[in-house]
Image (cartoon, rainbow, N blue to C red):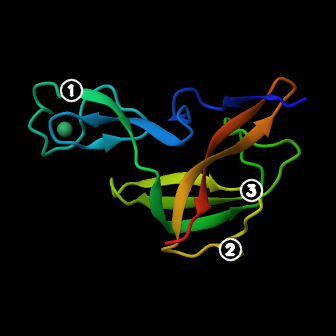
Amino acid sequence: MQKEQRPAVADWFTADDGQVRLKGTRCNDCGTPYFPKNTLACRNPQCTGAHDGSELVEYLFSTRGRIWSYADARYKPPAPYVSADPFVPYVVAAVELEVEQMVILGQVERGLTVDDLAVGMPVELTVGTLYEDDDAEHTVWMWRPVND
Ligand SMILES: [Zn+2]
């Protein structure tokens, strides 16, 4: 039987409409995006709203970018990080989003190695399994190469 799929971290991404999107916030005054969500105050020193309480609203990030850097993860990360048990090596990529120009870290889709990647390669968001337990597959956003 197929296990239930459940986000490993609640409310950091959505796939409700079939399209995976990272959920963050954005300043209504200056447009600065934040991921993960910043709900306190805008941290942009140039923001006019920063001094008298800017409004941060929920924001869905763009879904494509280019690999800025990447690395092999060959050792089980220490707590509080969670990973598959037994540990399965994976690849992480830092990706600069096209629209927001922000670098977002994420695992790369399973089955790919560092040999499959290159700096500047276009990628898009997808969802994959971070780890599994008796109840569910716990999912997280991942990067997947796409054609330019
Ligand atoms: Zn601002």
**Image quarter (top left, top right, bottom left or bottom right) of the N terminus:** top right
Q: Secondary structure at mark 2?
A: helix
84 vs 11, left or right, is right
Work out how far the residue at label 3 is from the one at label 1, CA to CA, in angstroms. 38 Å
The picture places residue 26, in percent across and down from the top left corner, at 29, 36
Three-letter code for the amino acid on which mark 1 is drawn:
Glu
Q: Amino acid at mark 3?
A: Arg
Identify the residue under disc 3: 110
Q: In the rendered structure, which disc, 2 or 1, sits on the residue that comes first in sequence?
A: 1
**Reading the chain from its start, which is encountered first: label 3 or label 1?**
1
Please tell me whether mark 3 or mark 1 is closer to you in this view: 3
Q: Position of residue 91 (x, y in %)?
A: 68, 61
Q: Residue at x 72, y 42 (%)?
A: 130
User: At 21% across and 43% down in the image, what residue appears?
Assistant: 44
What is the three-letter code of the residue carrying label 2? Asp
Left or right for 87, reference 12? right
* Disc 2 to disc 1: CB gap under 8 Å: no
Q: Position of residue 136 (x, y in %)?
A: 79, 27
- Ligand 1 within 8 A of label 3's CB? no
Mark number displayed over residue 55: 1
Which mark is on residue 116? 2
82 relative position to 2: left or right: left
Q: Earlier in the sequence, mark 3 or mark 2?
A: 3
